[in-house]
Image (cartoon, rainbow, N blue to C red):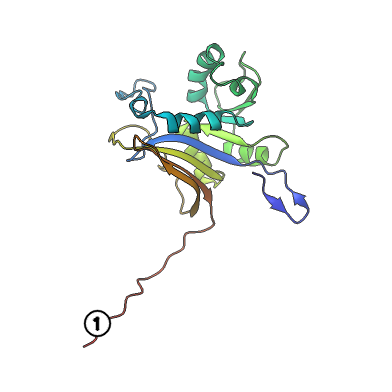
Amino acid sequence: RRLQSNEGESTIRQVTACEFITLDGVLQNEENDGDGFKYGGWFFGYADEASGAVIQERLAKPVDLLLGRKTFDIWEPYWPAHSHFWPNVMTATKYVASNTRASSEWQPTVFLGGDLALKVRELKQTDGPDLHIFGSADMLQTLFKADLVDRLELMTFPITLGTGKRLFRDGTIPAAFKMTEGQVTPNGMIIATYERDGEVRTGTPQVEADEE
């Protein structure tokens, strides 16, 4: 989906966070840098036909990827050897937030160093497909704080972990979203798409006082 302007279709590329999360907001799926996370693969037990169809639909979209460096380091050796499951991952441009890496044999890849929010804001103004984020919990905090995430495609699983990196942390700002798609799978996953919808709207209870 492209944003529209008075002059017609704009060139603003939409940024979508595509995440598996628990009821308590954890998206981490494996140990990172010896952090002791013990619940890798927590979502596999809930897979069903409905969720599989949604995943395949999402992976088939012609998008580019915006990834944190740790996520990219995991993907770099994995996906080239399993690309039959996700062919688009090989042709998509992978934009990687990193101040420690500048090159990769896995192409096309572009490393974004320095001011990430500025780089992504500029990237959104360029021609090209929309940008999808997977994992990348630390990078997301920078993007949330700068209000650069336009859409959330979330699969919420009926489980709590109590530990692990969460989707909404120190980068979270007050922001309203509207649900544009939603379903519940037979195994209890809530699959929903949310799009940014302006500022938080507040109110007061409209309850009349009891008559004396």
Given residues 147 and 81, the one toward you in this image is 81
Amino acid type at circle 1 is Asp
Does residue 96 lie above or below 119 as drawn? above
Q: Residue furthest left?
A: 212
Where's residue 89, x and y in %? 59, 22
Occupied quadrant, residue 36: top left
Occupied quadrant, residue 45: top left
Where's residue 175, x and y in %? 48, 53
Where's residue 169, x and y in %? 40, 42
Q: Residue at x 36, y 23 (%)?
A: 41
* The C terminus sits in image quarter: bottom left
Given residues 138 and 176, the one toward you in this image is 176
Q: Residue furthest top?
A: 81
SS class, disc 1: loop
Q: Does residue 171 show up?
A: no
Q: Residue at x 61, y 23 (%)?
A: 88
Does residue 77 lie above or below 20 as drawn? above
Does residue 167 lie above or below 67 as drawn? below
Where's residue 52, x and y in %? 46, 29
Residue marked by disc 1: 210
Image position of 23 (left or right of 127): left
Given residues 172 and 187, the one toward you in this image is 187
Q: How many numbered badges does the structure rendering display?
A: 1
* The N terminus sits in image quarter: top right
